Image: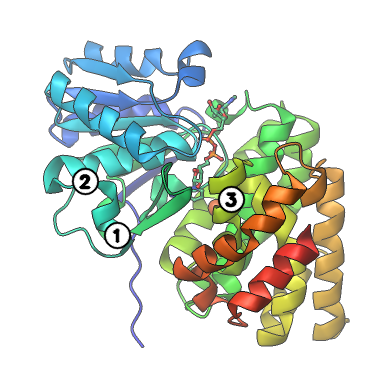
Amino acid sequence: MPTTFNIPPSIVTGAGAARELPVHAKRLGATKALLVTDEWMVKLGVAEPFAAMLREAGIPTEIFAGVQPDPSAQNVDEGLAALRAAGADFIVSVGGGSPMDCAKAVAVLATNGGAVRDYMGYEKIPRPGLPHIAIPTTAGTGSEVTRASVITDAERDEKMLLMSVQLVPSVALVDFELTMSMPPALTAAVGVDTLTHAIEAYVSKKANAVTDPIALACVDLCARFLRRAFHDGSDREAREGMALAACQGGMAFGNSSVCLVHGMSRPIGALFHVPHGISNAMLLPAVTRFSVRGAPARYARVARVFRAASEAQGDAAAADALVDALEALNRELGIPRLRDHPRMEEQRFSASIEKMSSDALASGSPGNNPVVPTAAEIAALYREAW
Ligand SMILES: NC(=O)c1ccc[n+]([C@@H]2O[C@H](COP(=O)([O-])OP(=O)(O)OC[C@H]3O[C@@H](n4cnc5c(N)ncnc54)[C@H](O)[C@@H]3O)[C@@H](O)[C@H]2O)c1
Ligand SMILES: [Fe+2]
């Protein structure tokens, strides 16, 4: 079966990459810009210098800082209103996955009309969006290079997944220096998201010859640099490695897929507002244990690249060692079990298992898993991970 590989036409990496913003904005024909970010990015003083850079280049720029973590459809509508009020024809996003995903949705709603829910699912967006330059400050979701946008429907407690080539940003400016301010807990949460992207992209039923080497390169970078970035945020080599890993993770899963971990993680995020990477990490060991029999050689390869197993170990032993290593990684990074997370409530969790299991299945992600689960198996995995 043929496979398609979509990434931004320009991906700029390395220290100082973000300072290339005006050059690319001009090249894309920007006349007025909207900078999409969140309040914390403004408070940290990260957002304003990018607006100033654009203004100096003769491109009037307004800032929309109304993006919440796990952006809602309402955030997107507010961003669209800000875009129209500013008369902007160009979008820059500065921040983690939340501002980037919100900006992607604003960019396509501006040209397609309608509401976010109309475009939920796979390749439902007819026209290209406005030009969009994504500048990630976490490492990370990889959203700067993917065709995915995750927007929460607050009324239905559901995280809507949109996957479309029309959502791929025009340019990704991947500047690890912007990630140096991440505190350890955030470094851990977003870093395990990256690792989960790589593992799921590699074991997915949609894995292919283009995404495989990128996914494994990402696992390798996570093995070398995730712990180092967590323990010492000033370690430039580790920060650079994880920024690159995040970008590779995005390239891999955006063109293969995520699987059961992400499928089960989104409902936890929608209902309990546990940070995305943390809910992935809490599910990853149990889901890996469940899924190994569907792709033992692939999990074993991940184990070896992650330095959890040696070449001498057989596939079954290597896959077991991977589960142990993922549990050890969570402990080292201070990621609790589901039941110990402050945002989780046992009664509400138990009462929500049925809805979470059916929402997980409906997202389509579990269908790409090496072992495709039933709703009952998903429910059992939620209980096991608790
Ligand atoms: N589109 C995709 O491909 C994709 C992939 C994975 C996850 N996601 C989505 O991305 C969202 C999560 O994104 P995220 O994990 O990057 O977090 P985020 O964007 O929600 O940011 C979390 C917090 O970290 C702060 N922050 C960001 N950069 C910082 C820095 N350098 N220093 C200090 N603080 C900083 C933010 O201000 C915010 O308060 C979720 O909604 C998730 O569903 C999207
Ligand atoms: Fe993710």
The structure's colour scheme is: rainbow
Q: Which residue is mark 2?
A: 108
**Amino acid type of the residue tagged 1 in the rendering:** Ser
SS assignment at label 2: helix
Q: Position of residue 87 (x, y in %)?
A: 11, 23
In the image, what residue occupies the spot 49% across and 39% down? 70
What secondary structure is found at the residue carrying circle 3? Answer: helix
Left or right position of 95 against 384: left
Residue placed under numbered mark 1 in the picture: 164
Q: Earlier in the sequence, mark 1 or mark 2?
A: 2
Q: Which mark is residue 245?
A: 3
Q: Residue at x 45, y 69 (%)?
A: 362
Image quarter hosting the N terminus = bottom left
Using the rendered image of the protein, determine whether residue 287 is visible from the camera's viewpoint: no
C-alpha gap between disc 2 and disc 3: 27 Å
Q: Quadrant of residue 322?
A: bottom right
> Viewer-nearest of labels 2 and 3?
2
Quadrant of the rendering where the C terminus is positioned = bottom right
Residue 217 x/y as whole percent: 61, 61
Answer whether residue 103 is visible to the viewer in this image.
yes
Tell whether 274 sits left or right of 58: right
Q: Is residue 172 left or right of residue 123?
A: right
- Within-10-Å neighbours for mark 3: few <14, some 14–19, many 20+: many
First in residue order: circle 1 vs circle 3: 1
Identify residue type, mark 2. Answer: Val
